Image (spheres, rainbow, N blue to C red):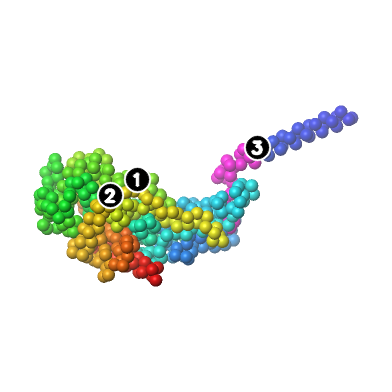
Amino acid sequence: MIPYIRRAAALCLVLLVALLVNAARVMVLEAESLDDDPANRRIAIERYAEPRGEIVVDGRPVTGSRDSGQQLRWERTYRQGPLYAPLTGFASQTYGTTLIENAEDEVLSGTDPMLAPLPLWNDLTRGHQPGGDVVTTIRASMQEAAFRGLDGKRGAVVAVEPSSGRVLALVSSPSYDPGVLSGTGRAVKDAWKRLNTSPNQPMLNRALRQTYPPGSTFKIVTAAAALDAGVVRDVEAPTDTPDPFVLPGTRQVLPNEAKGCADAPLAYAIQWSCNTVMAGLAVEVGLTGMVDAVERFGFNDTGLRVPSWVAKSNFDREMSPDQLALSSIGQFDTTATPLQMAMVAAAVANNGEIAHPYLVDRTTTSGGTTVDRTGRRSHRQAMTPSTAVQLQRLMVRAVEEGTGTNAAIPGARVGGKTGTAQHGFGNTGTPYAWFIAWAQAEDSAQPAVAVAVVVEDAEASRTDISGGGSAAPIAKAVMEEALRLEAESRG
């Protein structure tokens, strides 16, 4: 009898060891794949078992959480959702996350190891901390001024602090309330379908992910290229550019809206936006020189993050001379995001250097302890300081005596450039109205803000839309608010 008991005990021991080995295999070797399995609902239940951390603007949360009482318990809510949607994105139990909700998801959901009290704490406990907070660089009053200025028209506004790269306003219009996508069920699916089929594309982030022909605002980049290359040495000297100007290798004549552009100096061409002068200068700089200069501003960069990804602004690397001439005035295949054009204005304002733009100032624990802080870092040297100083003077003249007078602010030094970009087959589409600018208080050592505005209003008459008329007043309102905030901070 005893031998049988021994054999049974041995068999039980073998089975126990097999169970332990299998458990270890599942818990150690297959844990990650099981966690990532879409059929594992425990992950989703755990993810929404606690409120999400907050996204903060000017010291106040613009997000919240609501107890749904469902299995996926906590749903995301948004305060002034349409105002901040281009910044926050959405956090949906059905459709995932976008923008800051996506880029800072580990902090907001509490899974970032930096939130733990000790290293490897989350790995040892297989848990996570309460969701941390994301403190943004956005200034509420500037965001509101930009949102009011667009007033529901299709377009975007981006404002940055030239010296640091802090994004102070980021507006895309028309917008939407991300809260309608937060939960689950038929209402969320209906909202998703409605938003995605709307002809106004409210979920498109026009500030970061839509590119437009920049029109005459791009002439600032071309002017920088001409000055840095030595093609222009005196901005007041004639450029020997004919009007009419025939595009190289073609019979096509490039027109001017402004008068007096024949043989005009660079200063006059910026002040009154002469197409012919800028096209002629670009051809003199040449394709290689123009591509090098343009890419110093950030065009053709596919890696920019703020921390959300930004669409590539385009300048073709292979073109015929006539295409180069058109590209140099912001037409042909040249396209730019509003953020990119704000960076162009910031480069002029900051003596040629572009500070890396960023939206997140710092992340913190739920108790307010700083986990990580975004430091200032240089992004690119777009032009020499001497070229930037010359362009500052030319942009100031364009506002004081040229096409940008609608952006003038009493008691401040303002530089700007208008743009009206043609688009559509045969240029039959309603032109896009652009304005880029920067502003500096009289008693300040450096500019407080650089801004880019684009308005694409399909309901406007072609004769009623222009950079100076449609976009400059919006830029002015945003810059005035930036100057007011700067004056308040100085006491």
Identify residue type, mark 3: Arg
Q: Give residue 151's mark.
A: none
Crowding around mark 3 (Cα neighbors within 10 Å: few <14, some 14 to 19, many 20+) is few
Question: Which percent across, then down, holds residue 135?
Answer: 47, 59
Q: CA distance from mark 3 to mark 1?
A: 45 Å
Q: Which residue is mark 2?
A: 383
Q: Which residue is mark 3?
A: 25
Secondary structure of residue under mark 2: loop
What secondary structure prevails in the magenta region?
A: helix
Q: CA distance from mark 2 to mark 3?
A: 59 Å
Q: Which residues are magenta?
A: 25-50
Residue reaching furthest to the right: 1
Residue 45 visible (yes or no): no
Q: Disc 2 or disc 3, which is closer to the eye? A: 2
Residue shown at 32% from the left, 59% from the top: 450
Secondary structure of residue under mark 3: helix
Crowding around mark 2 (Cα neighbors within 10 Å: few <14, some 14 to 19, many 20+) is many
Q: Is residue 219 above or below residue 287?
A: below
Identify residue type, mark 1: Asp
Quarter of the view holding residue 458: bottom left
Q: Which residue is mark 1?
A: 301
Question: Which percent across, then down, holds residue 32?
Answer: 58, 42
Decide: marks 3, 1 in contact (CB < 8 A)? no
Between residues 368 and 176, which one lies in front from this camera angle? 368
Residue shown at 10% from the left, 53% from the top: 262
Q: CA distance from mark 1 to mark 2?
A: 17 Å
Residue shown at 32% from the left, 44% from the top: 300
Q: Who comes first in sequence, dot 1 or dot 2?
A: 1
